[in-house]
Every structure is written in structure tokens, then in C-alpha cells.
Image (tube, rainbow, N blue to C red):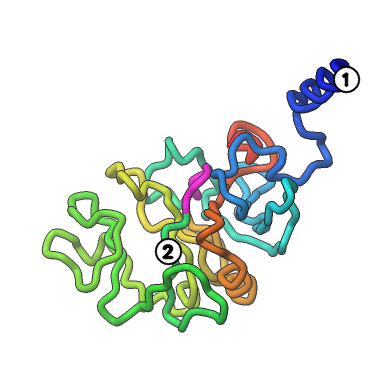
Amino acid sequence: MRLALVLASVLLLLPPAEGAPLPARMADTGGGTQLITAEAPHAGSTTGTVSWWDRRGGRWARAGSTTARFGANGLVDGARRRQGTSTTPTGLYSLPYAFGIQAAPPGTGFAYRRVTRDSWWCQDNRSRSYNRWVEGLPADCRAAESEHLLTYGRQYAHALVTGFNYARPVRGRGAGIFLHVAGDGPTAGCVSVPLRAMERILAWAEPGRRPHIAIGTASGPTALTRY
């Protein structure tokens, strides 16, 4: 009996096998039972894969997968990212809420905010509304330093806000990093997926299961398994 207990303890300390699902090989998945992973082959990539996962009975299983686009200048560690560099920040982030120009897909569980003609995402470093949705531009938020959401008709048909630089924004680090519908090429720093995949993700995600998004590479300093 004692030997069995010792062997069980040793097994628990061993790292997950190479063939284990990606979330099982990660250092942190956010503590929930759902996870979205956005993985690029390497830091200079502009393409990769987004997968979404469920944890049931102590095991992770892939619920879906799709092609993805990243920033035009690849990916960079989120803690070192600078605004305006067209890089996608790597790291593990919460998913505060969803939004879109179109109505929420059937089954959407996230709080979903509809875009209006007055909806902006303030990216002005001097504004008190930095990295926040605003209805009508505040006096201290310049239009040239913000996104008028309605003008991104294809990309913002549906989107999920990521928690990158969101809870306590650091000026100059970056604003408006979303998981959204893909356009014609790489992004300015967001992660994008095809429309149907975005709809499937919104219908799948359950806020009560605390889903997060993990963004990273297959290997190297920004590898997903480090998060």
C-alpha cells in the first residue's frame, strides 16, 4: 500500500507527456475548465492555429480548431510590447466580454455589446479612457488615436475583448487587442479567425467556466507551454 502511494506521488510530480493535449502541458490555464489557445509556429509568424478546449473529468479535450492570423510583425512577450508595433502580445488573458456589429450568434453566453455609430475604442495614451470602449469620444481622446468600431465592418462583426493591458492599463503598451473575425491579411496586433469559427467560439464559451485565451508560439521564450 505504501509503495503504491509513493508511486502515485511520483507520477503526479512528473511533467505531462509530450503527446498530452496542449493545455495539459501548460504551466497555467487560468483556473477554469475552458481555454482558447492561439499558437503560432514562431515569433515572426503571422499565421497559426486557434483551438478551443474543454476540461471534463480532469482531462482536456479539443472542442474545435481553425486557422488564425496574428500581427503583421509577429508576436512579442506581452510585458514588453509597445503600442503601434503591429505585434500580437503573448500571454494568458481573461475574456471580459464580447461585442459586434452584428447580433450575437445564437447560444452566445458572454455579455455581448452591440456596436453603434458612436462606438469607439480609445487608444489615446493621454486619455482617462485609454484601452476602453466609449460611446462618443471623450474630449481627451483623439479620434486619430482611436478605433471607430463601426468602420471595421468585417473584422468586428463579432469579437471578444482580451484582458491584455486591460485591468490596470500601462500607457504605451497597447490597447484594443481582440479575438475577432479575420480580414484580408495579418492584424495590427489582434488574433483573427474566420467568421464561422468566431461564431462557433461564441456559442461554445461559457463565462461560468472561466475561459481564458493563451497566445504564444510552439517553442522558444514565448512558447505557450510557459504560460
130 to the left or right of 156: left
Q: Residues within 10 Å of mark 2 (few under 14, many from 20)?
A: some
The residue located at (45%, 52%) in the rendering is 86
Q: Quadrant of residue 135?
A: bottom left
In the image, residue 123 lies at what x, y percent?
Answer: 29, 57
Q: Give the range drawn in magenta.
A: 88-94
The residue located at (76%, 46%) in the rendering is 21
The residue located at (30%, 42%) in the rendering is 170
Which label's residue is closer to the chain start, 2 or 1?
1
Q: Check disc 1 and report the residue beneath it.
A: 1
Q: Residues within 10 Å of mark 1 (few under 14, many from 20)?
A: few
Quadrant (top left/top right/bottom left/bottom right) for the N terminus? top right
180 to the left or right of 218: left
Which amino acid is tagged 2? Tyr
124 to the left or right of 42: left
Q: Check disc 2 and report the residue beneath it.
A: 97
In the image, residue 94 lies at what x, y percent?
Answer: 47, 51
